[in-house]
Amino acid sequence: MVSRVSLKTRGATGRARPPAVARVVAVVVRLVALLLLMASAVWGLQAAWSRWAVCFVDADPPLPGMARFDGACVAVQDHLYDYTIPSDPWVPIADAAQREGLSLLALGLPVLLLSLTVVNRWFIWVLGVAAGVAVGSVWLAMGVPTFLSGLAGEPVQVDDLADVPALGLFAPFLTLGLAFAAIHRGVGRDLNLDRDVWLGVFWAAMTVAQPLPELFTTVFLWSSHDTSPMTGFVRCAAVVVAAVAVAMTLVPASRRRARPGRRRSDALPGPRPAGRGLEQGGLS
């Protein structure tokens, strides 16, 4: 006799609900990731604004002796003022490097935390964790020397982490693939705004936030002879989108509205095809 799972143990999407302890752990982990993403966005925006405010509003130049208005905006685009992993020669701007370092450090952990809570086929889970490790390592390796340089007031190189940012050349392909896979999996469901869709939005935002995609995006939005004034803002905007996506994955399925013309009871699927077991573990 083929055993059946009671509908009471299923969510609105028809998937078996994970054990209560696993659900609680997954929710706590995602809440921590959400708080870190929000903190990263705030620190990153503060760092970017301290350098680029003169390009957007009638603000005082970030350093004494700079001309106001367009002259200051052009001047601060020089690589001399870059505060992310600075190198000689470098002129610090206020505490921008410390805040940028904290922003990058706070951004490195949420990607890995979220990837650990995603339930899916084993190879998708492995790819998600690999992407979390790769992307998180890049931001952590960038955040440590940036923060230390800000504290010291001069460039500080951490030799053990010098080669890690090279992962940023490949990590965007992992996160972009995960974004497409999650969205494709979610849009086939009978409910709007499925958790998988929001996970896809998260991975897409994390793709844009990475150094190489951010560089291309900032140059497209505001080209510069050195560093684009959009630097920092693009990443932080993507992080805000990622935070919203994580928050939406915490919304219970019962609170998400079914598509027009369908009752929630109609959304429950029939028998599952042979060979596809029920998913277990944390939130998906």
Image (spheres, rainbow, N blue to C red):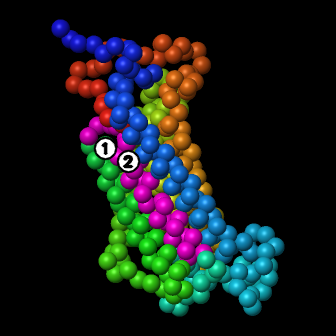
Q: Is residue 135 above or below residue 31?
A: below
- In this view, the residue in front, 206 or 94, is 94
Q: Is residue 72 above or below residue 46?
A: below
Q: Type of residue at label 2? A: Ser
Residue 226: quadrant of the picture = bottom right
Q: Secondary structure at mark 2?
A: helix
x and y, in percent, of residue 278 in the image = 29, 26
In this picture, which residue range is highlighted in magenta? 96-122
Magenta stretch containing residue 97, yes or no? Answer: yes
- Sequence order check, earlier mark of 2 and 1: 2
Q: CA distance from mark 2 to mark 1?
A: 7 Å
From the viewer's perspective, is 103 left or right of 13? right
Which mark is drawn over residue 125?
Answer: 1
Q: Main secondary structure of the magenta part?
A: helix
Q: Residue at x 43, y 16 (%)?
A: 268
Q: Are marks 2 and 1 in contact (CB under 8 Å)?
A: yes
Which residue is the extreme one toward the right? 58
Magenta stretch containing residue 149, yes or no? Answer: no
Q: Secondary structure at mark 1?
A: helix
x and y, in percent, of residue 252 in the image = 50, 29
Which mark is drawn over residue 115?
Answer: 2
Which residue is the extreme one toward the top? 1
Query: In the picture, which quadrant includes the C terminus?
Result: top left
Q: Type of residue at label 1? A: Trp
Q: Residue at x 42, y 57 (%)?
A: 109
Label 2 Cα crowd, 10 Å radius (few <14 / some 14-19 / many 20+)? many
From the viewer's perspective, is 160 left or right of 30? left
